[in-house]
Image (tube, rainbow, N blue to C red):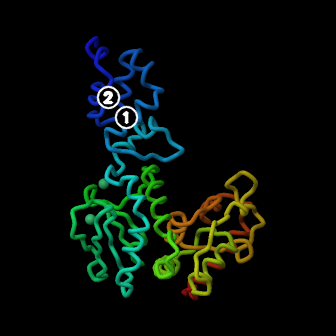
Amino acid sequence: MTLLLNLPYEILILILSYIEKSNTIIQFLLCHPSFLYHYNNNNDFWHDLCTLHHIYYRHPCNTWKEMVLSEEMYQVCPHFHLSLFEHLSHKQALAFLSNMNTNYRYICLHYHCDAIVTNQNIIDSQLECSHPIGLRISPYHLFSIECTFCNRQLGNNDKLPSEYYLIQSFIRAFATPLTLNLNLTFSLFHHRRMIELSVFNRPGWSYIIEKSWYDEWLRFLRGDQSYPPGILNNKILFKDNSDELKEDRKLGIHFELVNNASRYYIELLYIQSGKIISEYDLQALPSYCKLLHDIHLYQQQILFRPIII
Ligand SMILES: [Zn+2]
Ligand SMILES: [Zn+2]
């Protein structure tokens, strides 16, 4: 123990970085009051641990300590670097100003690599470069960021909020025109419309969306409006400072229903205030009986005459 206590900080944290379970790190801190005193609430200590794991990002609501103790540090992708944000406008031009005749594209996000695949017949195509992070865009892949080193899509695991936050921030920026280039804006919104039509037209109508935003979204999908809607304000459907829907809200007047794919896409791409809840969240409460009855009647009707754009 004396040996450990006398180790320089740089050596000690390097040793701890080889531990692969956060519980073991806690056990180490508990083994001597001096470690607990110096490191348990020391933000720099937990930050340094993440840095040694090549993790430079976290959800803004979480601390570096939570990043380690939740085991997120061991599971998030260490290959997606914040520096990728610096080259967003160049990557937008690469994705949306080349080969306009295809709805499929897969681009490398590495900053000095212009590798791109646009052949939609090669759905599982690989880039001809060795960089790990790529962005796949198509009506079936939406905007999916993939890491070939981690061998998975990034940002789609609920248990990794920091990774979701980072990927969501990147995709939102990528899907918004960052320059005044009209060709790029046209192409980008054209691709978004293709993707959003694909998710909108999938079956299932369970998620509650505020009516005026929904109507604006439909205008964009139908091509009556050239740009997508702004902030979704679902909060006005809820009682003050709660996630409880107001009982007197009416389908078709105050809200409309969308499917699960649309809910996922809206949460990923659009800024929103208030949650997107499902009709299933209301089923245990008798006060929503009338509202649920209207929803189920509507679902029966559109089962036979679905809204397809
Ligand atoms: Zn990775
Ligand atoms: Zn590359």
| Residue with the mark numbered 2 | 13
Q: Quadrant of the C terminus?
A: bottom right
Q: Position of residue 21 (x, y in %)?
A: 32, 35
Q: Hey, which residue is sitting farthest front in the picture?
A: 180
User: CA gap, disc 1 to disc 2?
Assistant: 8 Å
Check residue 48 in the rendering and tell me which mark sits there, or answer none. Answer: 1
Residue at coordinates 31% horizontally, 41% vertically from top-left?
Answer: 53
Does dot 2 land on a helix, a strand or a loop?
helix
Amino acid type for the residue under numbered disc 1: Asp
> Does the Cβ of the disc 1 residue fall within 8 Å of ligand 1?
no
Say which quarter of the image contains residue 95. bottom left
Query: Which one is in front, 85 or 4?
Result: 85
Q: Marks 1 and 2: CB-CB under 8 Å? A: yes
Q: Does residue 36 appear to the left or right of 298 in the view shown?
A: left
Compared with residue 81, is residue 101 higher up or lower down, i.e. above or below? below
Q: Position of residue 109 (x, y in %)?
A: 34, 64
Compared with residue 303, is residue 21 higher up or lower down, i.e. above or below? above
The quarter of the picture showing ligand 1: bottom left
Residue at coordinates 33% horizontally, 61% vertically from top-left?
Answer: 111
Query: Which one is in front, 222 or 116?
Result: 116
Check residue 192 in the rendering and tell me which mark sits there, or answer none. Answer: none
Does dot 1 land on a helix, a strand or a loop?
helix
Q: Residues within 10 Å of mark 2 (few under 14, many from 20)?
A: some
Compared with residue 40, is residue 208 higher up or lower down, i.e. above or below? below
Compared with residue 101, is residue 277 higher up or lower down, i.e. above or below? above
Amino acid type for the residue under numbered disc 2: Ile
